Amino acid sequence: MPPLLRVIVPIIVGVVFVTGWEGLVRWLSVPRFVLPAPSMIVTALIDDFFPLIGSAWVTLKVTLSAFFVALVLGVVTAIFFARSRIFEISLFPYAVVLQVTPICRSPRWC
């Protein structure tokens, strides 16, 4: 596929998606608290830019703090697993259970 198509096709798909979203929301008269139209989202971003940036900053700080705590706890736990045989024996079954993702073969049970 030519490099230009790799850029143009996703842009066209995005424009079609957003246009369809806007049209469907208006045509079906969907309440804005259920699904706002893209134009309403852009308007809200422009009108409430500074409060939204403040909220985004708070969210970013909380997310990075949680990531850092998880990173430190993960590394410390990994060190304990590698260095302490009793720690590994006692917690390894729980680590395995936490990593298991059930496979759903029937939609009735999912």
Image (spheres, grey):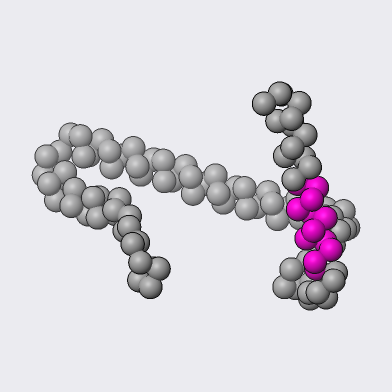
Quadrant (top left/top right/bottom left/bottom right) for the N terminus? top right
In-image side of 84 versus 72 (left or right): left
- What x and y, as percent, mark residue 35? 74, 68
Residue visible at 70% across and 55% down in the picture: 55
Residue visible at 79% across and 42% down in the picture: 12
Quadrant (top left/top right/bottom left/bottom right) for the C terminus? bottom left
Range shown magenta: 14-25
**Residue 72 visible:** yes
Residue closest to the eye, 51 or 18: 18
Q: Quadrant of residue 6?
A: top right
**Is 97 part of what is drawn in magenta?**
no
Q: As drawn, which residue projects farthest toward the front?
A: 1
Residue visible at 74% across and 30% down in the picture: 5
In-image side of 65 versus 36 (left or right): left
Residue closest to the eye, 37 or 52: 37
Q: Quadrant of residue 78?
A: top left
- What x and y, as percent, mark residue 108? 38, 73
Q: Which secondary structure is most common in the magenta stretch?
A: helix
- What x and y, as percent, mark residue 81? 21, 39
In-image side of 105 versus 44 (left or right): left
Q: As drawn, which residue projects farthest toward the top?
A: 2
Residue closest to the eye, 60 or 7: 7
Count how many numbered circles sit on residues in the image.
0
- What x and y, as percent, mark residue 79? 26, 35
**Residue 48 visible:** no
Residue visible at 78% across and 60% down in the picture: 21
Q: Quadrant of residue 7?
A: top right
